[in-house]
């Protein structure tokens, strides 16, 4: 009991409180985005998000209690679980829009293995780099880490899910940098990416290539450009303070598609204006800062790397999600952390925060 009390004394209440605020805000914005919906799927979005929020907070607290080093010791079993789920979804997964096969239907719930994989890969890569960080000047060690990444990332890519595949690569890049990768190794990695680009392009689905070509040349596909234009109108007409909660025209009149997921930031900017949009960015930024602070004070290399990985996911997905709403980046389908509708995505993000808290409550402890 004395040990349990001591770790809770170091619990990051600011990180926890900010996370809860973002969850509640996200539920409110999903409600606004799906108000007066007639589609049964949209009608279920708010109650489903509330259920997943409670489950996610419970998971976050559970992972806080579990010592992250215990999870690191289970790295092999976790890796096998991740790969198994990604293989199962290819054979038995539910096929969604555009032919993407990303979900496993358990009857009472649908799970997205790639979201679970994002958290597991942080633990398994963290263990690998924490064990081998002194060998990163050896190209063989870097190649081994790439092979460690390639299996799950490749399985995600062929679902197909390009956005999450990129997230996996970002996690690897940030964590290996945090472990002390030399600059010339980074150059080698970038060269490999450049050489692989034509192959990746040839393996992409038509709709994925269309998103990129539409971003580069909007006039090439007026229909695909339509939603991007609606997002620009929503953000532009929101002004400084917005039109008021649930009073947006582009969102409430349903001009803006997938407004509860990919384009929820446009709903925020239209209804709550510049102030609302900046506030969301500030709150997510505070979460990232607290997690990076946890990395700085971590008890060991594994703890620091886990925090780097979690911060990388939240930062990258936030920037990409907002960037595609502002037409600065192609549409990828990545969710806005804590805010966008999506049960497995929300639980994955909260699991990441839980891992970071596990590191934080054990800082300065060996």
Image: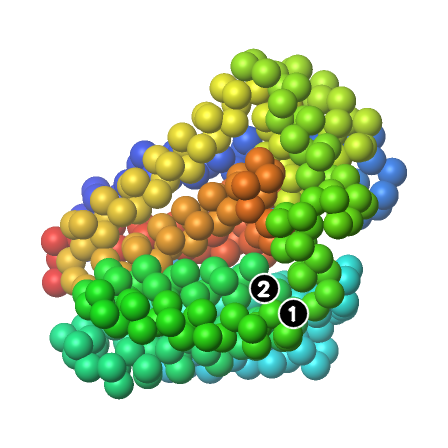
Q: Are dots 2 and 1 in contact, CB under 8 Å?
A: yes
Q: Secondary structure at mark 1?
A: loop
Residue 286 sits in quarter: top left
Picture coordinates of residue 284, whole percent (x, y): 42, 37
Name the residue nearer the viewer: 334 or 197. 197
* Rendered image quadrant of residue 42: top right
Residue 143: x and y in percent read: 32, 82
Q: Which quadrant of the structure image shows residue 259?
A: top right
Q: What residue is shown with label 2?
A: 162
In which quadrant is the C terminus drawn?
bottom left
Q: CA distance from mark 2 to mark 1?
A: 8 Å
Q: Could you tell me which residue is drawn at 23 percent across and 44 percent down?
A: 293
Number of numbered discs: 2
Would you say residue 326 is visible in this rendering? yes
Residue ID for mark 1: 204
Image x and y of residue 185, in percent = 26, 72
* Crowd rating for badge 1 (residues with CA inside 10 Å; few <14, some 14–19, many 20+): some
């Amino acid at each position: 009991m004395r040990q349990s009390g001591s770790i809770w004394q170091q619990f990051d209440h600011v990180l926890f409180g900010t996370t809860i605020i973002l969850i509640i805000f996200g539920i409110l914005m999903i409600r606004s985005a799906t108000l007066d919906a007639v589609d049964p799927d949209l009608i279920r979005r708010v109650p489903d998000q509330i259920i997943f929020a409670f489950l996610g907070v419970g998971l976050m607290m559970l992972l806080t209690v579990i010592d992250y080093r215990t999870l690191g010791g289970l790295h092999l079993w976790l890796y096998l679980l991740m790969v198994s789920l990604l293989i199962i979804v290819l054979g038995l997964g539910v096929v969604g829009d555009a032919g993407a096969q990303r979900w496993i239907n358990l009857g009472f719930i649908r799970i997205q293995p790639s979201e679970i994989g994002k958290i597991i890969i942080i633990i398994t890569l963290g263990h690998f780099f924490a064990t081998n960080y002194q060998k990163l000047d050896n190209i063989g060690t870097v190649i081994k880490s790439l092979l460690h990444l390639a299996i799950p990332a490749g399985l995600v890519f062929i679902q197909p899910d390009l956005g999450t595949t990129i997230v996996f690569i970002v996690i690897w890049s940030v964590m290996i940098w945090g472990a002390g990768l030399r600059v010339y190794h980074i150059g080698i990695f970038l060269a490999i990416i450049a050489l692989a680009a034509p192959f990746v392009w040839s393996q992409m689905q038509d709709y994925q290539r269309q998103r990129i070509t539409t971003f580069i040349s909007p006039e090439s596909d007026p229909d695909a450009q339509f939603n991007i234009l609606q997002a620009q109108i929503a953000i532009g007409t929101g002004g400084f303070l917005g039109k008021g909660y649930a009073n947006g025209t582009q969102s409430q009149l349903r001009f803006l598609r997938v407004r509860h997921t990919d384009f929820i930031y446009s709903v925020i900017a239209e209804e709550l204006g510049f102030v609302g949009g900046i506030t969301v960015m500030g709150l997510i930024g505070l979460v990232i800062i607290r997690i990076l602070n946890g990395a700085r004070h971590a008890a060991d290399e594994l703890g620091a790397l886990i925090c780097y990985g979690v911060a990388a996911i939240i930062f990258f997905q936030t920037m990409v999600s907002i960037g595609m709403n502002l037409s600065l980046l192609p549409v990828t389908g990545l969710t806005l952390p804590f805010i966008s509708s999506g049960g497995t995505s929300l639980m994955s993000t909260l699991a990441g925060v839980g891992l970071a808290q596990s590191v934080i409550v054990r800082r300065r402890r060996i």
